[in-house]
Image (cartoon, grey):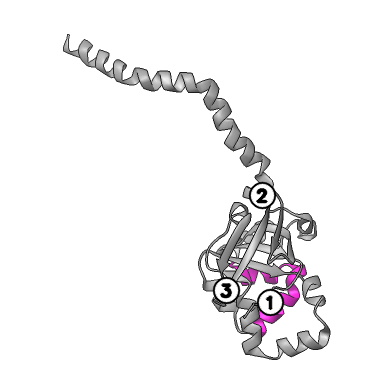
Amino acid sequence: RLRRVAVAVTAAAALPLALAACSSDSKDSTAKSTPSATASGDAMSTDKPFGPGCASVPKDGAGSFDGMAKDPVATAASNNPALSTLVAAVKKAGLVDTLNNAQNITVFAPTNDAFAKIPKADLDKVLNDKAQLTKILTYHVVGQKLTPKQLENGTFTTLEKSSLTTSGSGTTYKVNDTSNVVCGNVPTANATVYIVDTVLMPKS
C-alpha cells in the first residue's frame, strides 16, 4: 500500500508536469520552433558568418572560416588575404601578441579596400606614427564578444578607451554610421571578427 501511495504521489506530482508538457506541446512546438525558427532564420546572423564579403574568404585552408576558428585573431587575420594591410599595420604597431593573447574580444577588421580609401600620403603617415597607429587599431577592438543581436543598437567602449556605435539588423550592420559590416560573426579562437569596409577613426 505504501508503495501504491508513493506511486500515486509521484504520479500526482508528475501529472501537472506532464499536462504542462502536453498542453504546451502544441504551443511548445510552436514556441520552441519560433526561437529556433528565428535562430535558423537568423542562422546567418547568429550562428554563422554572414554578409557579401564572406564570399571572398577562402573555402578551405588556414584562411577559411574553419581555419580561422582554430587560430587566435591576429594569426587568423594573417591567413585571410583580404586583411593583409590590417595585419601589416598590427605588426607595425607591435599589437600581434596583445590581440592573440586577449580573451573574448571583438575585432572590427577593415579590409584592404577600406585602407585603400585613405589617401596614400595620410596612410603612410599613420603607418609611420606608432602611437597614432596603435590608437586607431585599438579603437577597432572591443573587450567582449559581441553577437549580431548586440550590434542592433549598441555603444561599446573600445580598447582605445573611447566608444563606437553599431546599428542595423538581420545581416546588415553599420559601425559609427559610416562603416558597413561586409562579413560578420567570423569566429577565431579568442575573438569574434566583423570585417568592415571603412577604417574607423577614434573620435578623440
Name the residue: 52% across, 71% down.
Answer: 102
Q: Marks 3/2: CA distance?
A: 24 Å
Q: In this picture, is 192 found above or below 47?
A: below
* Quarter occupied by the C terminus: bottom right
Q: Quadrant of residue 157?
A: bottom right
Was residue 77 drawn as part of the magenta stretch in this picture? yes
**Residue that mark 1 sits on:** 201
Q: Which element is circle 3 on?
A: helix
Q: Earlier in the sequence, mark 3 or mark 2?
A: 2
Whether the residues at callouts 1 and 3 have beta carbons within 8 Å, the answer is no
Residue 21 seen in the current view: yes
Q: Which residues are magenta?
A: 72-92
Task: Inspect the image, locate mark 2, and give the three-letter code of the amino acid beneath it.
Answer: Ser
Q: Which mark is residue 45?
A: 2
Q: Nearer the viewer, mark 3 or mark 2?
A: 2
| Label 1 Cα crowd, 10 Å radius (few <14 / some 14-19 / many 20+) | few
Disc tally is 3
